[in-house]
Amino acid sequence: MDMIFSFLSSALPSAWSSKASAVAEAIPDSSIHGARVSYPKESVPALYPNEKVGERVTSYAEENSSALPSHIVNYHDMIQKSQPKTANYMIHMSEAQALVFIAKTVGAKRVLEVGVYVGLSMLAWSHAVGPDGKVTGLEFDPHFAAMAEKSFSDHGVENADVIVGDALETLATLTPSEPYDIIFIDAQKSGYPLYLDTILKRSQPGIPNRLLRPGGLIIGDNVLRCGFVADDSTDNPWRNFDFGKHRPQYWKSQDVMSLKEFNAGVAGSARLENWLCPLWDGVNISRLLD
């Protein structure tokens, strides 16, 4: 996640210029010290004119938002240094701030996380729900699950635990005594459609041990996948990124196709209303109506 956030920031100048050119006739322009500036119109995301401004505005936004506890920030920094090959699996700190704010806004006390990695986002959820709340995580990799559990122990977190196994299977076996207020999905992207289908089937009105309460939130992370879900053309600079030999031409991958299916499934469901947030790597926030 952090890697994606940084790459997109560095790509902003060219992306901003092309968007500015596309709407140049429709919106006013100015010249500041010789640099052309086109103002955003409606939903055209001109954002910021260069990487430096983007970084400063992002830092300003983080600093002027409710701060995360120091143990979460320090754990994030430690994982970035100690696990450089996989640290980008973590959510960005500004996204953690947003998720905590959302959880507190809806009064969430029970959160289910699908895909834990080393537990950073679970620490954020734990903080959000408070000591009388409960956070449950599903993680495929026993090593990552152990690291998450250790982080809970190290930081005195007693309201979070991890179930080890393939979430494509374990999600359907859960029988919570009370339904969850939020289900956060941040696992293998090819599984997103099945996660959504399972949550909806297991949250039908009137069934016992339903997964998600009426009005509860389903939050899917990384649903734009470097923008490929919306734009896999050569205009997208991520096509030039090396995702590894096991993922050639990633813009055509099953991950991207599955995320398109997930987003369409959310938008097309009569049982959900949603907002697909284009920040970070795309966050699809939906509310269960029944």
Image (cartoon, rainbow, N blue to C red):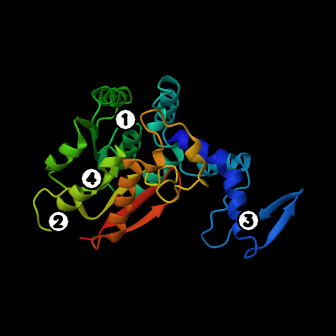
Amino acid, disc 1: Tyr
Q: Nearer the viewer, residue 231 or 16?
A: 231
Q: Which residue is drawn at 35% across and 27% down?
A: 147
Q: Nearer the viewer, residue 259 or 133?
A: 259
| Vertical order, 61 against 167 (above or below) | below
Q: Which residue is drawn at 68% across and 50% down?
A: 54
| Vertical order, 42 against 266 (above or below) | below
Amino acid, disc 4: Tyr
**Nearer the camera: disc 4 or disc 1:** 4
Q: How far apart are marks 2 and 4 (CA)?
A: 15 Å
x and y percentages locating residue 52 in the rendered image: 73, 45
x and y percentages locating residue 241 in the rendered image: 56, 40
Left or right of residue 195: residue 219? right
Closer to the N terminus: mark 4 or mark 3? 3
Q: Residue at x 51, y 31 (%)?
A: 74
The residue labelled by disc 3 is 21
The residue labelled by disc 4 is 195
Closer to the N terminus: mark 3 or mark 2? 3
Q: How far apart are marks 4 and 3 (CA)?
A: 40 Å
Question: Is residue 236 at all visible to an observer of this figure?
Answer: yes
Q: Residue at x 29, y 55 (%)?
A: 193
Closer to the N terminus: mark 3 or mark 1? 3
User: Could you classify mark 4 by the number of other residues whose Cα lies within 10 Å: few (under 14), some (14-19), or many (20 or more)?
Assistant: many
Left or right of residue 206: residue 117? right
Picture mark count: 4
Q: Is mark 3 on a helix, strand or loop?
A: helix
**Toward which corner of the image does residue 223 lie, by quadrant?**
bottom left
Q: How far apart are marks 4 and 1 (CA)?
A: 17 Å
The residue labelled by disc 2 is 204
Amino acid, disc 3: Ser
The residue labelled by disc 1 is 117
